Image (cartoon, rainbow, N blue to C red):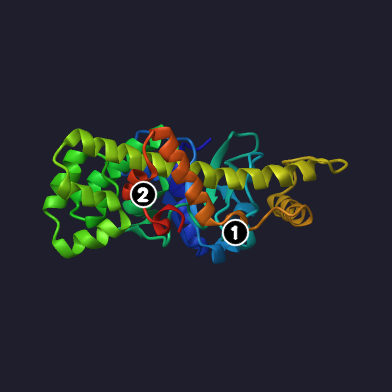
């Protein structure tokens, strides 16, 4: 089995040769940026209009002239089809270097969470920008938040103002804020209202509290966003597995496997746009209410630091 980093080099080359628009993100991007040492899975942003080319690449996967194999994985996710992927679904694939080898886990986004517009890192165009990776890492997993802060500090060192959207350390926040011009401050504060506290608050402990409250809002909203997709998948999966002779994933070639999954998703009504069923406003309102309860804080205080809907659920 090819080492994970060698596999990434191979996939990047094959994607470029195939003309498929992509950006590596999440854990492998953090490895590339020097913020963590290793990760098993790779996460890729693939433009919805390029999913057909991506499927063709998977269906003909070879390494060094030897046959490989791609397969959907059994965990929840949508077909690699724009009807689902353009609305925020992920898809999960395993790619084998050679018959019988363990598979490399490939997770695919076309509309990444918390990202309004995909951008690549300047001078490093195979990778999503540090800003995009930081947005995607604002999850309900505790292990992701040191990476958000680390990416923010790297952006600060690079003198990129969007560092202020991600830094979690109040000392660093104040340091970068004080050297940022007034017009830019206001634009950034509209995206991250917590920044307005930096002028009024002198107590670092209180600033720590506001940062923790803001993080709790991100966590609660993401729990509800992710849960919406999970419920949609479970409802579909229960209907599908009740079919006579049901089997998943199958051992058939990837093209046939994809057709099987896509046909099942249509027949058993896997919702294409779960966030359209429960409006973003409802998800955000639920997240804000839960954050206030968990923090034992009044709603008014939560609203003072809550990121706007365009950041939480673009």
On the image, the x and y values in percent for residue 153 come to 23, 44
Image quadrant where residue 143 sits: top left
**For the residue carrying disc 2, how many other residues have a C-alpha within 10 Å: few (<14), some (14-19), or many (20+)?**
some
- Of residue 77 and residue 175, the one placed in the foreground of this image is 175
On the image, the x and y values in percent for residue 175 come to 13, 46
Q: Is residue 258 left or right of residue 131?
A: right
On the image, the x and y values in percent for residue 289 come to 46, 43
Asked if one can make out residue 89 in the rendered structure from this viewpoint, the answer is: yes
182 over 253 or under it: above or below = below
38 over 83 or under it: above or below = above
Q: Are marks 2 and 1 in contact (CB under 8 Å)?
A: no
- Of residue 203 and residue 118, the one placed in the foreground of this image is 203
User: What residue did someone put label 1 on?
Assistant: 276
Residue at the spot 74% in from the left edge and 53% down from the top edge = 256
83 over 100 or under it: above or below = below
Which dot marks residue 303? Answer: 2
- Could you tell which of marks 2 and 1 lies nearer the N-terminus? 1
Image quadrant where residue 308 sits: bottom left
Q: Secondary structure at mark 2?
A: helix
Which dot marks residue 55? Answer: none
On the image, the x and y values in percent for residue 181 come to 13, 60
């Amino acid at each position: 089995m090819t080492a994970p980093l060698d596999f990434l080099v191979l996939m990047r080359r094959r994607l470029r040769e195939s003309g498929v628009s992509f950006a590596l993100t999440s854990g492998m991007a953090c490895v590339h940026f020097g913020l963590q040492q290793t990760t098993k899975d790779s996460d890729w942003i693939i433009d919805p209009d390029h999913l057909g080319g991506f499927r063709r690449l998977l269906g003909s996967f070879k390494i060094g002239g030897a046959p490989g194999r791609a397969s959907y994985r059994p965990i929840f996710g949508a077909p690699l089809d724009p009807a689902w992927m353009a609305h925020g679904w992920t898809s999960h694939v395993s790619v084998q270097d050679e018959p019988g080898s363990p598979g490399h886990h490939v997770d695919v986004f076309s509309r990444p969470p918390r990202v309004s517009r995909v951008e690549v890192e300047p001078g490093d165009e195979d990778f999503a920008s540090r800003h995009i990776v930081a947005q995607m890492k604002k999850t309900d997993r505790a292990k992701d938040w040191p990476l958000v802060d680390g990416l923010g500090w790297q952006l600060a060192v690079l003198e990129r103002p969007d560092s202020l959207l991600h830094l979690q350390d109040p000392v660093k926040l104040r340091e970068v804020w004080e050297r940022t011009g007034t017009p830019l401050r206001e634009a950034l504060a509209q995206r991250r209202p917590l920044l307005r506290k930096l002028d009024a608050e002198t107590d670092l402990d209180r600033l720590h509290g506001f940062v923790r409250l803001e993080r709790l809002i991100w966590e609660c909203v993401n729990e509800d966003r992710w849960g919406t997709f999970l419920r949609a998948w479970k409802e579909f999966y229960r209907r599908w597995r009740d079919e006579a002779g049901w089997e998943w994933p199958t051992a058939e070639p990837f093209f046939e496997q994809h057709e099987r999954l896509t046909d099942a998703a249509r027949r058993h009504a896997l919702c294409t746009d779960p966030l359209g069923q429960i409006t973003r406003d409802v998800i955000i309102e639920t997240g804000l209410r839960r954050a206030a309860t968990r923090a034992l804080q009044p709603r008014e205080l939560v609203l003072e630091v809550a990121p706007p809907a365009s950041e939480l659920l673009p």
